[in-house]
Image (cartoon, coloured by chain):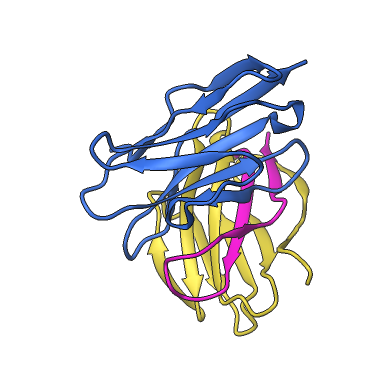
Chain colours: A blue, B yellow
Amino acid sequence: AQRVTQPEKLLSVFKGAPVELKCNYSYSGSPELFWYVQYSRQRLQLLLRHISRESIKGFTADLNKGETSFHLKKPFAQEEDSAMYYCALQEAGNMLTFGGGTRLMVKP
Amino acid sequence: KAGVTQTPRYLIKTRGQQVTLSCSPISGHRSVSWYQQTPGQGLQFLFEYFSETQRNKGNFPGRFSGRQFSNSRSEMNVSTLELGDSALYLCASRRSGEYTGELFFGEGSRLTVL
Protein backbone atom coordinates (compact mmCIF):
# COMPACT_ATOMS: atom_id res chain seq x y z
CA ALA A 1 0.00 0.00 0.00
CA GLN A 2 1.35 3.39 -0.92
CA ARG A 3 2.19 5.24 2.25
CA VAL A 4 3.06 8.61 0.74
CA THR A 5 1.03 10.17 -2.04
CA GLN A 6 1.87 13.25 -4.02
CA PRO A 7 -1.11 13.70 -6.31
CA GLU A 8 0.50 16.15 -8.72
CA LYS A 9 3.35 15.02 -10.93
CA LEU A 10 3.78 18.51 -12.31
CA LEU A 11 2.91 21.90 -10.88
CA SER A 12 3.48 25.00 -12.97
CA VAL A 13 3.14 28.51 -11.54
CA PHE A 14 4.27 32.01 -12.40
CA LYS A 15 6.96 33.80 -10.46
CA GLY A 16 5.48 35.55 -7.46
CA ALA A 17 2.45 33.26 -7.25
CA PRO A 18 1.78 31.13 -4.16
CA VAL A 19 2.79 27.49 -4.29
CA GLU A 20 1.36 24.46 -2.51
CA LEU A 21 2.76 20.99 -3.14
CA LYS A 22 0.46 18.37 -1.72
CA CYS A 23 1.50 15.34 0.28
CA ASN A 24 -0.75 12.81 1.98
CA TYR A 25 0.46 9.90 4.03
CA SER A 26 -0.87 6.70 5.48
CA TYR A 27 0.59 5.67 8.82
CA SER A 28 -1.04 4.62 12.05
CA GLY A 29 1.75 5.70 14.38
CA SER A 30 3.34 9.09 15.01
CA PRO A 31 4.93 10.01 11.71
CA GLU A 32 8.07 11.90 11.02
CA LEU A 33 7.75 13.70 7.73
CA PHE A 34 10.25 15.40 5.49
CA TRP A 35 10.46 17.27 2.24
CA TYR A 36 13.45 16.56 0.02
CA VAL A 37 14.34 18.59 -3.07
CA GLN A 38 16.37 17.83 -6.16
CA TYR A 39 17.47 20.82 -8.21
CA SER A 40 18.64 20.30 -11.79
CA ARG A 41 21.99 18.48 -11.86
CA GLN A 42 22.21 18.44 -8.06
CA ARG A 43 21.87 15.76 -5.45
CA LEU A 44 18.68 14.99 -3.64
CA GLN A 45 18.83 16.95 -0.40
CA LEU A 46 16.75 17.63 2.67
CA LEU A 47 14.63 20.77 2.47
CA LEU A 48 12.83 20.62 5.78
CA ARG A 49 11.42 18.29 8.43
CA HIS A 50 8.18 18.70 10.32
CA ILE A 51 9.64 18.40 13.80
CA SER A 52 11.83 21.44 13.22
CA ARG A 53 8.87 23.68 12.38
CA GLU A 54 11.27 25.80 10.40
CA SER A 55 11.05 27.85 7.23
CA ILE A 56 13.70 27.07 4.65
CA LYS A 57 14.06 29.22 1.53
CA GLY A 58 10.62 30.60 2.33
CA PHE A 59 9.01 27.16 2.36
CA THR A 60 6.95 25.86 5.28
CA ALA A 61 5.07 22.65 5.84
CA ASP A 62 2.53 21.86 8.53
CA LEU A 63 1.68 18.37 9.66
CA ASN A 64 -2.08 17.89 9.77
CA LYS A 65 -2.71 14.60 11.53
CA GLY A 66 -6.46 14.83 11.05
CA GLU A 67 -6.13 15.06 7.29
CA THR A 68 -2.90 13.00 7.25
CA SER A 69 -1.28 15.68 5.14
CA PHE A 70 2.04 17.49 5.04
CA HIS A 71 1.68 20.05 2.29
CA LEU A 72 4.62 22.25 1.33
CA LYS A 73 3.84 25.94 0.86
CA LYS A 74 5.55 29.11 -0.22
CA PRO A 75 3.73 32.45 -0.53
CA PHE A 76 5.75 33.81 -3.45
CA ALA A 77 7.46 31.38 -5.82
CA GLN A 78 10.85 32.21 -7.33
CA GLU A 79 12.36 30.83 -10.53
CA GLU A 80 15.12 29.18 -8.51
CA ASP A 81 12.48 27.08 -6.75
CA SER A 82 12.02 25.04 -9.92
CA ALA A 83 12.97 21.50 -8.94
CA MET A 84 11.68 18.04 -8.11
CA TYR A 85 10.14 17.82 -4.65
CA TYR A 86 9.69 14.61 -2.71
CA CYS A 87 7.67 14.11 0.44
CA ALA A 88 9.04 11.37 2.68
CA LEU A 89 7.71 9.43 5.67
CA GLN A 90 9.90 8.03 8.40
CA GLU A 91 8.27 5.01 9.97
CA ALA A 92 9.53 3.80 13.32
CA GLY A 93 12.30 1.27 12.86
CA ASN A 94 12.30 1.61 9.13
CA MET A 95 13.74 3.64 6.32
CA LEU A 96 12.33 6.67 4.59
CA THR A 97 9.47 6.02 2.20
CA PHE A 98 9.23 8.60 -0.56
CA GLY A 99 6.26 9.83 -2.51
CA GLY A 100 6.29 9.84 -6.29
CA GLY A 101 7.53 13.41 -6.45
CA THR A 102 6.18 16.65 -7.88
CA ARG A 103 8.04 18.67 -10.45
CA LEU A 104 7.63 22.36 -9.74
CA MET A 105 8.14 24.73 -12.64
CA VAL A 106 8.20 28.44 -11.89
CA LYS A 107 7.75 30.48 -15.02
CA PRO A 108 9.10 34.04 -15.34
CA LYS B 1 33.92 16.92 4.32
CA ALA B 2 33.54 14.96 1.10
CA GLY B 3 30.00 13.98 0.24
CA VAL B 4 28.65 10.55 -0.55
CA THR B 5 30.59 9.17 -3.50
CA GLN B 6 29.18 6.65 -5.94
CA THR B 7 31.02 4.79 -8.67
CA PRO B 8 30.67 4.29 -11.51
CA ARG B 9 28.51 7.25 -12.46
CA TYR B 10 27.30 5.74 -15.71
CA LEU B 11 27.33 2.24 -17.08
CA ILE B 12 25.73 0.22 -19.83
CA LYS B 13 25.09 -3.49 -19.56
CA THR B 14 23.18 -6.07 -21.55
CA ARG B 15 20.43 -8.35 -20.35
CA GLY B 16 21.66 -11.29 -18.36
CA GLN B 17 24.83 -9.61 -17.16
CA GLN B 18 25.50 -8.62 -13.60
CA VAL B 19 26.63 -5.30 -12.17
CA THR B 20 28.27 -4.04 -8.99
CA LEU B 21 27.84 -0.48 -7.77
CA SER B 22 29.93 1.12 -5.07
CA CYS B 23 29.16 3.74 -2.45
CA SER B 24 31.48 5.55 -0.06
CA PRO B 25 29.53 7.31 2.69
CA ILE B 26 30.44 10.56 4.36
CA SER B 27 33.27 10.02 6.83
CA GLY B 28 31.85 8.97 10.16
CA HIS B 29 28.52 7.85 8.75
CA ARG B 30 27.79 4.22 9.52
CA SER B 31 24.38 3.77 7.93
CA VAL B 32 24.17 3.32 4.18
CA SER B 33 20.96 2.84 2.25
CA TRP B 34 20.23 2.27 -1.41
CA TYR B 35 17.34 3.53 -3.51
CA GLN B 36 16.27 2.90 -7.08
CA GLN B 37 14.97 5.95 -8.92
CA THR B 38 12.92 5.60 -12.11
CA PRO B 39 10.55 8.01 -13.86
CA GLY B 40 7.62 5.65 -13.42
CA GLN B 41 8.15 4.39 -9.87
CA GLY B 42 10.00 7.29 -8.28
CA LEU B 43 12.31 6.49 -5.39
CA GLN B 44 12.05 2.95 -4.10
CA PHE B 45 13.97 1.65 -1.12
CA LEU B 46 16.26 -1.29 -1.80
CA PHE B 47 18.10 -1.99 1.46
CA GLU B 48 19.94 -0.45 4.36
CA TYR B 49 23.14 -1.45 6.09
CA PHE B 50 24.49 -0.50 9.45
CA SER B 51 27.71 -1.84 10.92
CA GLU B 52 28.03 -4.41 8.13
CA THR B 53 24.53 -5.81 8.81
CA GLN B 54 21.50 -5.50 6.61
CA ARG B 55 18.82 -3.93 8.78
CA ASN B 56 16.01 -3.39 6.31
CA LYS B 57 15.15 -4.62 2.88
CA GLY B 58 12.69 -3.28 0.35
CA ASN B 59 10.43 -5.23 -1.93
CA PHE B 60 12.91 -6.22 -4.62
CA PRO B 61 13.74 -9.69 -5.96
CA GLY B 62 16.72 -11.66 -4.73
CA ARG B 63 18.72 -10.60 -7.79
CA PHE B 64 19.37 -7.40 -5.88
CA SER B 65 21.87 -7.80 -3.08
CA GLY B 66 24.29 -5.70 -1.15
CA ARG B 67 26.90 -5.64 1.53
CA GLN B 68 28.78 -3.26 3.74
CA PHE B 69 32.41 -3.34 4.67
CA SER B 70 34.09 -2.54 7.98
CA ASN B 71 34.97 0.96 6.72
CA SER B 72 31.22 1.55 6.04
CA ARG B 73 31.67 1.49 2.28
CA SER B 74 28.88 -0.40 0.59
CA GLU B 75 28.31 -2.25 -2.63
CA MET B 76 25.16 -3.40 -4.30
CA ASN B 77 24.96 -6.10 -6.91
CA VAL B 78 22.30 -6.87 -9.46
CA SER B 79 22.53 -10.24 -11.18
CA THR B 80 20.83 -11.45 -14.35
CA LEU B 81 20.00 -7.93 -15.44
CA GLU B 82 16.64 -7.17 -16.99
CA LEU B 83 15.61 -4.21 -19.11
CA GLY B 84 13.48 -2.95 -16.24
CA ASP B 85 16.55 -2.60 -14.03
CA SER B 86 17.56 0.48 -16.00
CA ALA B 87 17.48 3.24 -13.41
CA LEU B 88 19.42 5.69 -11.33
CA TYR B 89 20.68 3.94 -8.21
CA LEU B 90 21.13 6.29 -5.30
CA CYS B 91 23.14 5.68 -2.19
CA ALA B 92 22.51 7.67 0.97
CA SER B 93 24.32 7.76 4.27
CA ARG B 94 23.25 8.76 7.73
CA ARG B 95 25.36 9.72 10.70
CA SER B 96 23.90 7.39 13.29
CA GLY B 97 22.09 4.14 13.42
CA GLU B 98 18.93 5.75 14.69
CA TYR B 99 16.03 6.16 12.29
CA THR B 100 15.96 9.88 12.57
CA GLY B 101 17.85 12.62 10.96
CA GLU B 102 18.86 13.59 7.52
CA LEU B 103 19.85 11.27 4.69
CA PHE B 104 22.76 12.50 2.57
CA PHE B 105 22.54 11.33 -1.01
CA GLY B 106 25.17 10.65 -3.62
CA GLU B 107 24.85 11.68 -7.25
CA GLY B 108 23.87 8.18 -8.25
CA SER B 109 24.96 5.50 -10.66
CA ARG B 110 22.94 5.52 -13.86
CA LEU B 111 22.52 2.00 -15.18
CA THR B 112 21.26 1.33 -18.68
CA VAL B 113 20.40 -2.23 -19.60
CA LEU B 114 20.19 -3.01 -23.31
Q: Is residue A55 above or below residue A83?
A: below
Is B95 part of what is drawn in magenta? yes
Residue occupying the point 31% across, 62% down: A92
Viewer-nearest residue: B23 or A39? A39
* Callout count: 0
In the picture, the quarter occupied by the N terminus of chain A is top left
Residue occupying the point 60% across, 85% down: B70
Q: Residue A14, percent across and down? A: 68, 14
In the rendered structure, the answer to whether residue B76 lies left or right of residue A62 reads right
Q: Is residue B46 above or below residue B53?
A: above
Viewer-nearest residue: B3 or B50? B3
In the rendered structure, the answer to whether residue A92 lies left or right of residue A52 reads left
Q: Residue B34, percent across and down? A: 55, 57
In the rendered structure, the answer to whether residue A61 lies left or right of residue A107 reads left
Residue occupying the point 58% across, 61% down: B76
Read off the magenta span.
B86-114
Q: Is residue B33 above or below residue A62?
A: below
Task: Report if residue B17 is visible in the image.
Answer: no
In the rendered structure, the answer to whether residue A92 lies left or right of residue A37 reads left
Residue occupying the point 62% across, 66% down: B75
Task: Report if residue A90 is visible in the image.
Answer: yes
Viewer-nearest residue: B50 or B86? B50
In the picture, the quarter occupied by the C terminus of chain A is top right
Q: Residue B10, percent across and down? A: 77, 46
Q: Quadrant of residue B57?
A: bottom left
Is B93 part of what is drawn in magenta? yes
Q: Residue B81, percent across and down? A: 58, 45
